[in-house]
Structures are given as structure tokens and as C-alpha cells.
Image (tube, rainbow, N blue to C red):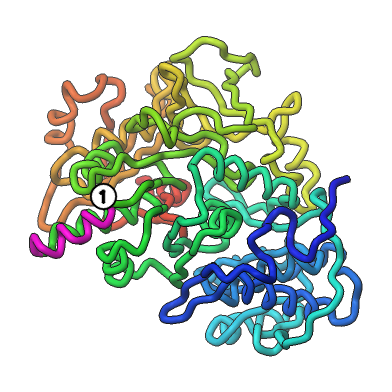
Amino acid sequence: MESTKDTSLPSFHHLNDDHSKVALIEGDNSTSYSDLHARINCMATNLLDGKSDLNEERIAFLMPASLDYVTMLFGVWRAGGIAVPLNVSSALAELEHALTCAGVTRVVANGEYSENISDLCEKLNIKLSSVNEILTDKSGTLPEISLDRRAMILFTSGTTNKPKGVVSTHKNIRAQITTLIEAWAWDYDDTIPLFLPLHHIHGIINVLCCGLWAGASVSLFPKFDMDNILNEVASNSYNVFMAVPTIYVKMIQHLDTLDDADKKSITNGFRNMRLNISGSAACPVKVYNQWLELTGQVLLERYGMTEIGMAISNPYDGERRAGAVGIALPGVEVSLFDDDDNLLDEEDKPGEIRIKGNNVFLEYWGNKEATEGSYKDGWFCTGDVAVKENGYYRIMGRSSVDIIKSGGYKLSALEIEGTLLTHDDIAECAVIGSPDEMWGEAVTAFIGLKPEKTMVYEDLKAWCDGKMSPYKIPKQIIIIDALPRNAMGKVTKPALKEMLP
């Protein structure tokens, strides 16, 4: 069993008493690593309230990106508890599921978030506090934290089933961070904005924890504030930028509304960065190319999930391919398996992605059956299907929602969506398989059109001719105002299946 004997968390060595570098920026305020370290230790001491160790007590917190959020996350860890970050956009029923599933005993929330959850906490007999009610200047003896202890419970997105509580240990978290520190060349001088939801691994690990591990400066935003963030970009405040594809689409659309001078100052701000990353959902090739043309930045696309952190990435140095997620990250084993659980050694054959490594989670909280069912022969089964092409993995989609079995073919919904998005009149689209007696599943496209545009099926079918194989062309289209999405911008395809005629 590995353990740490210093007064900070395992290997977050920049969180020490004599480090004056700015760690966090929140509006006009900044917090040094030294002050953040002291604040975390005070929070941990007060959470302990005389105990020697929280012994993996589950403490949830409901707050957006902020100094208080960071204090809670690291304070719970430092006191020996399990952090349960909650989604600030969740409905009460979703919050109730998370709290009861994880066996949470305390919730910390501020302001409006405290008001929103107070009745639920009373109903569940869970103590509700604010950061100000807990935090004092008192700092005391804190427990040693071994790397094999449980550290965090994050909930799966619930796009295919009811959200499960994913338990990661400190060892898992360290592996997830260090592989990205190496692969993406994180540096002490990096600065990055953080506006992604902080109940999700993308914001927590890829941005916040990697930034603090490296000694970088992280600029905190409660949500994506287009104007303020782009103003900072134009001022060259950042040299690393991470977002989901929908954010890049919104920025591209916004840039088209600006005059030449303002547009140039922003695009130059991105051009001057060392790295732009897209993730959490597939980045359409059209968006990838538009961003390259506007900013000169070759987006780095990667692949990961709540249970494993990041596993595959396009290289920092080397070729980045549009539509591909790259190669296995350092310390992560990746293989593809067919439907009969045979290892696929040949390229160009689709198979399920399976993962091994210290990055892989410990368990689903309180769900032994689901935990055991997610492994085969020691490999974690992601449920995602990919194909390896010239050494790079390309995601075809989730086996349950993005792989369409039609007329004997296995079709990638993501590939079809990528082609449809090149249509000038289509703003967004999602493709699913609908039950069909002849084909087994028929390719069905839900399409959101650009303003004042119309579309009929025969015209789209004619447009598709020559752009995709005949068996991939949608058999029907359904025009909708907007696709249903979760907090990370992923389309919730089960909701689309309920909309089928």
C-alpha cells in the first residue's frame, strides 16, 4: 500500500505552503497555490470536526466552478472522504438518485443551489451546509491518504441507462492525470479557462486536476461565458483551451457575426495558443476543418469516459487526424474485440474498445453485478465500437445506440452524421436505427435546420447520392427544432427513439 506523509494530497506537490504562483483566477480575484493549500487544509480540518479520518464518508457538493468548489473537492479528499460532485443543472429527481445511490451523508451548497436542494436534503435526512458555515481558519492534524483509497464518485451520463456511481481511487485519479501531463505536455507556465461542468471527468480531471498538478493557472467560470472568455482569448490570457464540440460550433457561429478587426483579434488569440482540444463527444470533420481555417489550430481529439478517464488521444507532437481519436495514451492498454470476444489483430475491422490500466475505475458504487458485468478477462468493456485505420482509432459509436445493424451491415451513426453535417442547410443532426421488418433497422435522421430553411426527404436522398454508400443513406428524416442533449452536449438518443412515429 502506497501512502503519502506530507501535508498535501498524493503528488499534488505544487499545493504547498511556500508556493506563490497563481493557482486559480475567479473574476477579479486570484488565489495562490500557498493560499489554496491553506484553505484546503482548513476545510479538511473543519470537515473532520475532531475526527481523525472521514473514512470514506460520502460528501456531496452542489456548486459551479469556483474557489469554493476546488476547496470542497480537495478538502474532502484531504480529510479522507469520498467527493461526490453534483450536477448544478440536474432536476431534483436526478439529484435524489445521486444522493441515495451514493449514500451521501452531507451536502454542501451555496446560495441559490442551497435553496434548490434544501427540501430534498430534509426529506432524505441529509445535513445541508454552506462553505461559509464550515470553513474557519482552524487547521489541524490531517490523516495520511493512501493511493488505494476511494476518492470520488461521478455519475455516468445516463444516455443509455440509469446513471451509475463510478468510484475512482486516488491511484486511478493519479494515473488519469499523469498520462495527460505526459501526453499533452502540461507545463508550469500554462493558463487555461475552465467553464465545463464540474460533475464530469472532462472538467475535473482534464482541466482542473491536470492544471493544478502541473502548477498551471486555471481561470474559473460558472458556465461558458462567450463574451468574457473570448475577450480573454483576444488578450492572450490563455495558451491551452479545452471544450466540447458544441462550444466550438457556437464560437464559429459567433465569429461570423463580428467585424473583421474583432474577429481577427480573437482568432489570433487562439492561433497563439499551444493547444486546443475537443472531447466528450465526436467532433464533426466539418467543425474540425472550420476551426483549422479560422485559427490555424489543429484540434486534438481524444477518447475517454467516466470509468477510465482518457484512454486514447491524437498526439501532441505528430499527425492529428480529423475524425480519429488517435492512439493509446501512455500507461493505457487498448484493444478491439469482436462480438465473440475474439481479439482483433487486423486493422479496418470494427470491434468493441476494451481497456486495461491503473486509470480504470474501482467499481460501481453498491452495484457488484454491474461492476463484474463490465469486465471480460480483465478488460473493461467500454461499449464503444471503433475501427483502427493506419494505426489510429476512429470511433464508430456506442454499440447500443450508434451502431445500426441494417441489411447485414454494421453502420456507424457518427459517420453518417458527419456527412449530413456538411449539408449547407443542416445545423445539427442525429442518426439512429428504427425497427424495420425488411432491414432489421432502418437509418433514421433527426435533423435541425438552419433558420428559414426547409427540407424534404427526396431532396436529401438525392444530395446523399455519391457522398455515402446507398445502404447508409437515411430511409427517413424527421425535422425537429432542437436535438435533446445532456449537460456535456451529448445527444440523448434514447429520447429520440421515443420520438419515432
**Quarter occupied by the N terminus:** top right
**Label 1: how many Cα within 10 Å (few below 14, some 14–19, many 20+):** many
From the top left corner, tell me how far across and down residue 74 is, in percent.
68, 66
User: Which residue type does callout 1 highlight?
Assistant: Arg
| Magenta segment | 259-271
Q: Quadrant of residue 229?
A: bottom left
Find out whether residue 260 is within the magenta segment: yes
Asked whether 438 or 288 is in front, the reply is 288
Residue at mark 1: 271
Asked whether 5 or 192 is in front, the reply is 5
Q: Residue at x 73, y 48 (%)?
A: 364
Image height of 211 relative to 321, above or below = below
From the top left corner, tell me how far across and down residue 242 is, in percent.
41, 53
Find out whether residue 498 is within the magenta segment: no
Image height of 317 relative to 25, above or below = above
Q: Main secondary structure of the magenta part?
A: helix
From the top left corner, tell me how far across and down residue 109 is, in percent.
62, 80
